[in-house]
Amino acid sequence: MIRLVRCIGGALAVVCWTFAVQSVAEVPSYLDPVPLAAIGPLGKIGDGRAIDVIDFAVADLNGDGFDDVVVARWVGTLFVNGPALSPLILLNDQSGSFFDGTSQLIAAPIPEFFVVREMIIEDFNGDGQLDIFFSNNGYEEIAPGNTGFDCEKNGLLLSGADGKLHDVSATHLPDLIDFSHGSSAADIDGDGDIDIWVNNLGCEVNVPSYLLLNDGTGKFTIVADTGVDDGFSAPPFVGRNDRLPDDFTQGAGAQFVDADRDGDQDLYVHVSDGVHRLLLNDGAGRFSSAPSTSLPALILPTLNDSIAIDLDLDGRQDLVLLEIPGFDPGYVLQVLINRPGSGFRDETGERLPVQVNQSNGSCCARLRVGDIDGDGRLDLMIKLFGDNFEPGTEVADFFLNKGCGIFERLSPSIFEKVGPVFIAVDSNRDGFVDFLSLEFRSDEAEFFLVVAAPQGPAVANPIECVRTTSLVAAVLPSSRSVQVGTAASAFATIINTGADTATGCGIAPVNSLSADFTFQTTDPATNAVTGAADTPADIAGSNGFQTYVLTFTPTAPISPIEVELGFECAGAEPANSTVGLNTLLLSASDDPVPDVVALAATLDNDGIVKLFSTGVFAVATVNIGVDGTITATADTGGAVIPVQISVCETNPASGACFAAPVDAATGVTTQLDAGETPTFGIFVSSNEVIAFDPAVNRIFVRFTDNGGVVRGATSVAVRTQ
């Protein structure tokens, strides 16, 4: 076992990544390119121009466990019109090569497209088989007499009962001619099917960007768009329908990403000329603007490609952006790390080596990902044509993920056998990336396979990304349940364990909520507010602390949600989030409801129930809502902890149980009127060792109404002594 640690940061906050490596992975060498003899050259069109490839996509299309490849063909320039061409399906022959399986997998008539900007492979009709959406933009030549591009309709292939893909573009997609410049797919409304966002940049008739909802069978309807009925834009002008912000316009690139870790997909969009935006999803496919501070500035003005991936293994999706300076040569990768409470932070300099190839390359760069060294982590790959597309001037940037999103550049010579038009694919299922690339020989394009020759088998290296920060935080009470429009408040404390003063310390919810939020500093002795609302504070080092009051005012009903809070200071790593310790279980209803504020007390007043085979703690409550029947239960919050728990209601004066304790899963039911202050005893026993891990090993006490809605909660850590 080898343990490697890399840290970045200063005295105030340090972030460390710990590599727990079973064996040291090695970058393989690569065999000489081998042509796909079963396919041969792609040929030419009537005027002598060679057929080329504009994009690849990889998936197991026939369910045999091997990677297959979808190929979008064109005649290689955007600015001169060419014929429409059908896509190719390269099926894996299960012996490390590919054959043309287009007619085997796509039912006749096979559709043809002019220019495919992007291919999205998902199960759109819910039958367990993969389907393909073609995001098309057509050639970018303005025909005589026109004022814009001709563009073309998007395409959709859905799987049928015969096991083949069928062209349903005419019946399952809007009847629009698009200039679709970057689409993305996800289940945006939580109904279990895959929806699509389509970016449009405008054609001879200006088609707006739009949101497609799936009816579950793969038939899509526009439910929101950015169009304006101005006589120039194309219909249908369904409007934003409270699904898109009023000031949001068309975009040039898009990526669904769970930015706030609330379980639904938010929308990252590059608008134009260095402007990008983040739209937060409320879980029902309605998007609102995230604060402008949620995204740092782009390095270059145009986004050409992007991926959403959890680089630092903290459970939050990060973004890797490939940016270019318009149609001028050059490119740069930018790494945006998702930080709770503050959005995305530019950590390019910390995670990528200095990028030296910004002066070369072309406008048509694509970012590829794959596992080069077989360690189970995704690496980053770019290879581009060089100056004037001259052979020998290609630019290659391949970055090896050493763990937790820290990358090192690999020597371009390793990948000199890979052409600029390529896709990473595991052709022989050995766990290492091979490359399918396109090369021009005898004036025609031909597929070549470059296969990895590793020194040994692929070994997944388990990684533990350990974050350390000087900030810690707590919230009390740990739950609130109010009527819509009624403020729900809680108190929070941030402690700075570092040596230096932490500056600009504030709090913000990470989740997207139908609620207005404010924070304000308080006097810790009296809880009286100080300063101005939403004004960060400085916190002295050496365990200095600052207290705050948090206020949520729901604007619509909220089902119980564990609100994660970002406790962050300028230039510092935010405090770690622990459910029950510094989160708030929040719910809101149209009608008045019980609101049980609960506080737990352990024998040593340290929030830890210590077991000498048995242990006990008390919970005091007050109902600051309306009357209700409440059941008190206790559990371990989903963690598997070898404990037995029972609960009873107690005499507030003596602490004695009114009746024998009952199993905590069943709980104790009581009538809890407004203003009443019942108390409860929680009894815990175990004959096994329980480690001290307060983020995981906790006992939660919940107070639930007759409708099964949690109206109050508290928790303590548990350990054996």
Image (cartoon, rainbow, N blue to C red):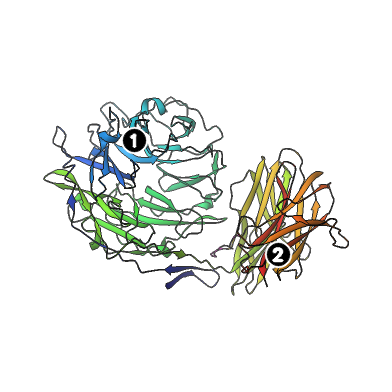
In the image, residue 712 above or below residue 120: below
Where disc 1 sits, the SS reads strand
Sequence-first tag of 2 and 1: 1
**Residue 620 in the figure: left or right of residue 67:** right
Horizontal and vertical percent position of residue 30: 23, 60
Horizontal and vertical percent position of residue 59: 34, 45
Foreground of the two, 645 or 671: 645
Residue 573 among those drawn in magenta: yes
Which quadrant of the structure image shows residue 593? top right
In the image, residue 550 above or below residue 455: above
Q: Which mark is residue 136?
A: 1
Residue 167 among those drawn in magenta: no
Where disc 2 sits, the SS reads strand
Name the residue type under label 2: Ser
Q: Residue at label 2?
A: 685
Horizontal and vertical percent position of residue 561: 64, 48
In the image, residue 469 above or below residue 651: below
Name the residue type under label 1: Asn
Foreground of the two, 328 or 659: 659
**Residue 215 in the figure: left or right of residue 306:** right
Foreground of the two, 588 or 518: 588
Q: Residue at x 58, y 52 (%)?
A: 510
Q: Quadrant of the N terminus?
A: bottom left
- Name the mark nearer the viewer: 2 or 1: 2
Q: Which mark is residue 34?
A: none
Q: Residue at x 38, y 40 (%)?
A: 120
Cβ atoms under marks 2 and 1 closer than 8 Å: no
Distance between mark 2 and mark 1 Cα atoms: 63 Å
**Residue 501 in the figure: left or right of residue 335:** right
Q: Quadrant of the C terminus?
A: bottom right
What's the magenta region?
Answer: 570-577
